[in-house]
Structures are given as structure tokens and as C-alpha cells.
Image (tube, coloured by chain):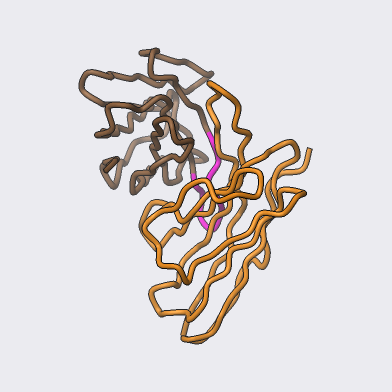
Chain colours: A brown, B orange
């Protein structure tokens, strides 16, 4: 079955770039997503990338996809304290049912 | 355009009881998915409904059941509650179109505590 792996924690200094990594196993993935979850809240879609792309940029966010290695990353430029949250990677194949990782807790300190 | 709303936001039940959670989909969406998120974990897929029919089911027992209504709102029912059912239950709506990204839009969740 599908599996999505992420490291559990990342700590960065305010103003630095953050890079959150994700690996997945499903070679038939068509779309990959990044979601953000703040304490006590639901998940907010940040961005997504189609599997035939290798990069997507959206303001401070850059998504890189290495399909050969099944590796996805999310780079947040100029990280702010408001970016502190849990970030989830998710992938889906043809079933329209995304599979989520366990999430990476991003801690931004001054 | 209204987003996804869930009710209730918090509830406490005892083991063996039954619970119904409700979700109102985002306008224009034809699909609703339910996920269970235990503390410190990622969301686990329970099931998905597309145009009132179950469109996929995760590894959850039959005491987890659902419905989608003609207005695309949805219910999640859990019978014979167990302590391990304590979790945040997330509803997500999406619009399935051929070749589309099918992004999920989540509600704030219903926090269930089973004592």
C-alpha cells in the first residue's frame, strides 16, 4: 500500500528558509500536496504539484518534486513565527483519495 | 462561498455509546471524505462519498458508517464506541473532475473524547 514518510520536527530561526522533506512509495502518484495545520484547527491546503512537474513556486513557497526518488520538499522562504505549525505531505494516485504523512512540526524561534 | 463546516466541535461520550458527526460541504463540491486524526498522527482515511455513493473505504471496521445527502452534506456515524476512537474527526470536501487535482478542503474538525 501507499506510504508517506516525513521527519517529525524542524526548528529554524526567524528569517531563515525552512525545508520540509517527504518521501512516498506509490509510483502511480499523480498529485502531491502540502497542507498546514495550526493547533486545534483543520488542515489548510498550501499548494500542490502535478507529477509531471518538478518545481512549483507560489510566493514564499517552493515545491520540488523528484519523481525518480519519490521525494517531495517544501521550501518556505523568510520563515516567520506565524509559519509555526504542523505541515503534512499527501499524495494520491488515480483514486482521488490522498494518503497523508504523520506531519512535520515546524518551530520558528526568534 | 462558504467553507466546510462541522458539528459539533467537541463532544464527550462513554464506551459503547453511538455518535453522529455532521459536515456541510463547500459550495460546488460533489465529494466528501472523512478522516480520523489521533493525537500526534496524520489523518487516516475512513471513507469517501461521491454523489451519495461510497467511493472508497479505508481500514476501519463496519461500525464506522456514513451518508452523503443530495445537498452534499454528510454524516459520520460510529457505533459501539471504544476508547481508541478518541480523536479529531475531519471532514473534507472536494470537486472531482476528470484530470483535476481534487484538492481537499477541510473543516475544523470534531474532537471526540471517549471515556
> Is B6 displayed left or right of B12 in the figure?
right
In the image, A31: left or right of B24? left
- Name the foreground residue: A24 vs A78: A24
Residue B79 image point, x, y percent: 52, 77
In percent of the image, x 61 and y 70: which residue is there? B10
In percent of width and height, residue B39 lies at 39, 63
Does residue B95 appear to the left or right of B62 in the view shown?
right
What residue do we see at 57% from left, 69% from top?
A: B77
What's drawn in magenta, residue-wise?
A37-45
Residue B81 seen: yes
In the image, taking residue A41 as reference, residue B29 lies left or right, namely: right
Q: How many marks?
A: 0
Report the quarter where the N terminus of chain B lies: top right
Residue A109 visible: no
Q: Residue at x 52, y 46 (%)?
A: B55
| x then y, percent, for residue B5 | 69, 53
Q: Is residue A12 above or below residue A62?
A: below
Relative to B53, residue B114 above or below: below
Residue furthest left as drawn: A69
Q: Position of residue A35 (x, y in %)?
A: 48, 38
Q: Check the image and report above or below for A26 versus A42.
A: above
Q: Residue at x 68, y 64 (%)?
A: B7
Amino acid at each position: 500500500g501507499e506510504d508517506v514518510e516525513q521527519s517529525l520536527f524542524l526548528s529554524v530561526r526567524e528569517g531563515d528558509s525552512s525545508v520540509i522533506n517527504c518521501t512516498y512509495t506509490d509510483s502511480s502518484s499523480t498529485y502531491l500536496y502540502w497542507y498546514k495545520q495550526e493547533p486545534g484547527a483543520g488542515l489548510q491546503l498550501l499548494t500542490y504539484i502535478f507529477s509531471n512537474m518538478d518545481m512549483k513556486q507560489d510566493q514564499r513557497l517552493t515545491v520540488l518534486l523528484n519523481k525518480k526518488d519519490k521525494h517531495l520538499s517544501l521550501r518556505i522562504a523568510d520563515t516567520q513565527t506565524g509559519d509555526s505549525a504542523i505541515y503534512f505531505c499527501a499524495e494520491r494516485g488515480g483514486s482521488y483519495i490522498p494518503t497523508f504523512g504523520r506531519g512535520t512540526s515546524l518551530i520558528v524561534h526568534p | 462561498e462558504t467553507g466546510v463546516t462541522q458539528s459539533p466541535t467537541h463532544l464527550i461520550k462513554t464506551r459503547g455509546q453511538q455518535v453522529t458527526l455532521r459536515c456541510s460541504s463547500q459550495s460546488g463540491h460533489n465529494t466528501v471524505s472523512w478522516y480520523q486524526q489521533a493525537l500526534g498522527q496524520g489523518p487516516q482515511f475512513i471513507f469517501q462519498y461521491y454523489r451519495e455513493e461510497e467511493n472508497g473505504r479505508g481500514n476501519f471496521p463496519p461500525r464506522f458508517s456514513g451518508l452523503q445527502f443530495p445537498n452534499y452534506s454528510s454524516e459520520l456515524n460510529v457505533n459501539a464506541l471504544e476508547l481508541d476512537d478518541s480523536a479529531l474527526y475531519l471532514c473534507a470536501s472536494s470537486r472531482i473532475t476528470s484530470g483535476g487535482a481534487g484538492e481537499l478542503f477541510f473543516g475544523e474538525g470534531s474532537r471526540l473524547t471517549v471515556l
